[in-house]
Image: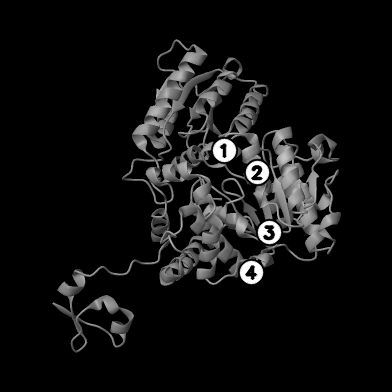
Amino acid sequence: MNRVLKKGTINAYPWAGRYLNGRVNLSTIAQVRLPRPKSYENAVEDLNSLQSNLATLENIWKARGRLNQRSLPEMINLCERIGYQVEDFDRLNVIHVTGTKGKGSTCALSESILRNMHGDKHIKTGLFTSPHLIEVRERIRINGSPIDKDSFTRYFYECWERLEETRDKALDDQPSRPSYFRFLNLMAYHIFMQEKVDVAILEVGVGGEYDSTNIVRKPVVCGISALGIDHQAVLGNTIEEIAWHKAGIIKQNVPVFTVPQPEEAMKVIERRASEKNAPLHVIPSHEAIQGLDKISIGLAGSHQLSNSSLAISLCDSWNRIRKCNVSPETVRPLNSVPQEFVPGLKNVKWPGRGQILATPGFTETEWYLDGAHTMESMKACAEWFSNTVDHEDSPVENILLFNSANGRDGLAQIKLLSEIQQKVNFKHAVFCPNLTHSRIKSSADSRNIVLKVDQELSTQRSLANTWTSMTNEPDQHHANLFPDIEKAVNWILSGSNPGKKKRRVLVTGSLHLVGGVMTVLGAECT
């Protein structure tokens, strides 16, 4: 059977094969792969192909600095291949934030403050963070909202196709395609330039010195949230080594603000700021900032007061430098909250961090979501959840849903949570890998090809056994292990609750776990 093509069709479809008097043999076409539609789902599938498998990641971790030092030249090359020079990004008026605990929250707070300011001109914001919880487009936000699917798809293929066209311009020994995170960072630069944002708030991925966000030459201001031990395979095992990487975002003559840090870390930050002639300011404790204790901040947990203090000084400095044309060396930390910052502090939203989520159809069950994954953030999470017990008048059944990725200090975190068991009395502790659904039904956004399931199950089994031994629970059903997040959530929801007693489920240990739970519960991407 033959089909007649319209005039000009053959030029649009070079794959069409044999062409004779306007006719194409369909049996020939059937053997040729048709171009994939440029859909959001296909864009995410193509993006997922950039995820490194576990073996590759392990080689990167072992290589440490040798591969790190190539990161920024390779990222600059990627930007040039899609049409940008690094100095073009000076126009983004960047706020650059790193840290171990609270860097994402600080970015969210800063974005909300600037977007909600009432002035002569609305400030158009761009926000780049990681990881995502439900959909990958959450990582790139315009005016506080995830970029819409159509725009994500359009911008994705603009970058993707341009990189394909310029493979011959890649550096020697540079991978033919960038890593997953670098590609998203590249997209963020492209989107923020095309959308002409007034400010781009960039959260560092890992470390700072060699992070792909660090190609920005002239941010307006930099911030460092609380430092601790994390990502040792990449950053080092001591607080001094980690501080060196984090302080790598400090730029020549650009003011930098930091929360109070451990003495060893602060010495490193001071030295690196001095080398760059960068004005360094330690923000006052939140108790010393007049008016902050009177504001109901939109993020739960007392630790958010410190993040808010940092965000307030970052936004004030940005506003004074960009809108009031003051000299960068004259900015100082604030000791009071500007009235115009209050709406942003109150209205900030940062899903998965100190968030309480109701369950449609299961009104008695509430999910307390906090993606804490370091010892410092887990302490804050434990305090936040245990404090809810003090405000309960009726009987409540508490359940723990936990995951700690291999390489995290999961055993220490479990020990910390076991210390609040006497107060909160978790009836069940549930463990599972960071696998949302079975491989077959998993959506592209929640797919994780890095995960080695057998190894992850073994890790979670070890954590479950540790929990049982630490809490001395006689009930053999107290600790439960499931092969994926969906089965764990369904087991919790289907559990016996004859008196319809209120149930609170603390979900913590991993932002990937929190995102998987939100996906299973049908939460929206916001």
Query: On the image, numbered disc 3 is attached to which residue?
Result: 94
Label 4: few (<14), some or many (≥20) within 10 Å? few
Q: CA distance from mark 2 to mark 4?
A: 27 Å
Circle number at residue 236 = 1
Disc 1 and disc 3 in contact, CB within 8 angstroms: no
Mark sitting earlier along the chain (1/3): 3
Numbered disc in front, either 4 or 3: 4
- Camera sees residue 493: yes
Dot 4 falls on a residue whose secondary structure is helix
Circle number at residue 244 = 2
Badge 2 amino acid: Trp
Numbered disc in front, either 2 or 3: 2
Dot 1 falls on a residue whose secondary structure is loop
Q: CA distance from mark 1 to mark 2?
A: 10 Å
Q: CA distance from mark 4 to mark 3?
A: 12 Å
329, 111: nearer the viewer: 329
